[in-house]
Amino acid sequence: MNEIVREAQAGRAEAFEALVQHFGPQVYRLASAIVGRDDATDVAQETFLAAWRELPRLREPDRFEPWLRRILVNRARNVLRSRQRRPATSLDRPGPAHQLAGNGDFREAAHARQALDGAFAGLSADQRAVIALHYGADLSIRDAAESMGVAIGTAKSRLNTALRRLRKAVEGQP
């Protein structure tokens, strides 16, 4: 893979296309986990565009994957921040988890998923990113921290806070 990265750094579009083919599904899944399906394609595309522009500056080709994840996390943060700046409508706001009671059939699972999605939407961009990187992309806390550009202790703190907030939201606590 390092050789393909070097070729892409030299400006070979075919080499970069190979990188997009290889990392594309992973980038899309991670983007979807952080920003949701509606914006995941845009975030993935912006990630690869930024990577193409900045690739000549990458000093260590063997660090391409964590470097690409960091770009993705930054693009996802931008999308989530722009969402916060627009006024929310009543359709955008999830209801409290305790209002989503199921009645024992498939609807219970659907309501639980809706509650979890609503709780996840209430997390900060950094909290979403650390959960997606650690649990969704199966990265260690160290690798998740590196992808986010933060210290390991900061990543642990954000993960702990996010999990606590998710538990409270799903359990219907304030």
Image (spheres, rainbow, N blue to C red):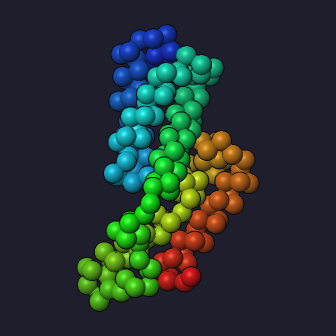
Position of 106 relative to 37 (above/below): below
Q: Where is residue 55 in the image (x, y as percent from the top left)?
A: 53, 21
Q: Which of 52 and 174 is in front in this view?
A: 174
Quarter of the picture containing the C terminus is bottom right
Q: Residue at x 55, y 41 (%)?
A: 74
Q: Quadrant of residue 86?
A: bottom left
- Left or right relative to 173: residue 118: left
Residue found farthest to the bottom: 103
Is residue 15 something that shows in the picture? yes
Give me the residue at 61% from left, 44% from top: 148
The image shows residue 8, relative to residue 63, as above or below, that is: above
Residue occupying image coordinates x 65% and y 59%: 158
Residue 132 is at least partly visible in this image: no
Residue 127 drawn at (x, y percent): 58, 58
Q: Is residue 112 above or below residue 153?
A: below
Total residue callouts: 0
Residue 28 falls in image quadrant? top left
Q: As displayed, is residue 92 above or below residue 32?
A: below
Toward the front, the furthest residue is 87
Q: Position of residue 78 (x, y in %)?
A: 51, 44
The residue at the point 38 percent across, 46 percent down is 40
Place of residue 12 in the rendered image (x, y in percent of width and height, measured from the top left): 41, 11
